[in-house]
Image: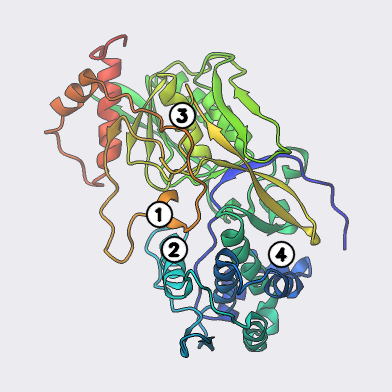
Amino acid sequence: MKRRRPLRGCALGVALVLAALPGARAVAADDPRAASWAEVGFTWAPLERRLRNDSCAEHRDRFEACLLALAALGAGREPPALPVPDTGKTGAVWRDAPRSVAPPFSLEARAERERGLVARWASESTPAVDFEALFRELRQRVEPDAAPGLAARGVAAYLRRAVDPHTAIAPYPAVDAAYHHAARGTPVHAFFRRRQGDETVESETVFERGFSLVWVRVHHFDDVACFEVSSALATAIERGARGVLLDLRGNLGGVSREAACIADLFLPARTEIVRIEPIVADFERRVLQAQSGVVVDAPVAVLVDSWSASGAEVVAAALQTTGRGIVVGARTFGKGTYQEAAPWAEHPDVVYYRTTARLVVGAGYEFQMHGVLPDLPVDDESPPAEAPVLREDNAYVNPIPAVHPPVPPRRTAALEACVAGRSAEPVGSDGDRAALTARRALWCWLSGRLPGS
């Protein structure tokens, strides 16, 4: 295999694995990384070693991890029976997961499925189960073209439970194809590579009672995100824009330096953006500070929702704690951990993402588990009963706990009164209540109705 240079850097993103698809061949066809797993020659060996060597049936965490690995491997198939020797009962290793309604990832389906498995099979006295035999039976049902992708999916499911929810692996070709600059900077999490036809940044001009505002939607942080945001802002401000709607809804994270760079656009030089505090012995504390000085001094409203995660939360929290922006929307996802990328010891062409630190902002606050709490809350649209809003604190069975308090929202009486005074206005045809609230907040700021504005 071709030897690749070591990766140095990190990624801020949520390790979301696509939910089970209707069968092995469907997985091979639909998983965007399937071809890359085949290209690197991924085999069954790493998964088989875990099922054989990690005492799957002796420790609860390992039992659940092995169970989830087999569930990922057998997606959509008729499952074998899992014998439980001490009761004589049998049951399915997994059950069919409903299709998710929340784009772009089926986190609801996967979380519901994993919780069901753990609830059904995990107990304080874990039974002895022959995971190797179950693995061999499942492997015989997998079609050859689907094997690399399914084997990798099984390993990923195992790591997610045995280590933490955001420990992951990715094939080098997928990383390279996504961001060709990754090897000379901070590599991005492969789960967030740009899909063909996707735009990183979109912008448009809107008007609020005579004030021109630029609405910038940042869908993810790839290696051109900051450049595209700064270009969009410069063009809009040159044309007379007075305020900024920075829309981070649905932004799951990506390249850490790009998130910090976007926050940098609005902050004075040497302002602290985020502290990266180690949770493992071999990681050194880091502090990311603004470098450029204020590039954009216009008022900012940051739009967030439950799918704003990681790097998006860094930007929102940095502008919130410094008083530089008003955060509008719903509580964010709450992913405040930091992953470093390195070649995987078990395979030279696979990247291993290891959780090494937590993210701390302001005067000792964090958003891990808590999320970023909006200054002006506007709830997500009510989801159907079968797809509840999931975040870090309820999507996983083993999230890393928070050790610091959440960032306190800046809910001032003047801001709330001003926005409430305009609440009788119609929402508009698109029904975007959060965006309308953000526009009202910027109007209050620009028209001098807030203290210090």
Tag 3: Cα neighbours inside 10 Å, few (<14), some, or many (≥20)?
many
Marks 3/1: CA–CA distance: 20 Å
- Residue carrying label 1: 394
> Which comes sooner in the sequence, label 2 or label 4?
4
Query: What amino acid type is highlighted by mark number 2?
Result: Ala
- Residue carrying label 3: 365
**Depth-wise, is mark 3 or mark 4 nearer the camera?**
3
- Residue carrying label 2: 111
Query: What amino acid type is highlighted by mark number 3?
Result: Tyr
**Depth-wise, is mark 2 or mark 4 nearer the camera?**
2
Tag 2: Cα neighbours inside 10 Å, few (<14), some, or many (≥20)?
some
Marks 2/1: CA–CA distance: 9 Å
Note whether residue 28 is visible: yes
Q: Nearer the viewer, residue 93 or 231?
A: 93
- Residue carrying label 4: 36
Q: Label 2, secondary structure: give it.
A: helix
> Which comes sooner in the sequence, label 3 or label 4?
4
Query: What amino acid type is highlighted by mark number 1?
Result: Asn
Tag 4: Cα neighbours inside 10 Å, few (<14), some, or many (≥20)?
many
CB within 8 Å, label 2 to label 1: yes
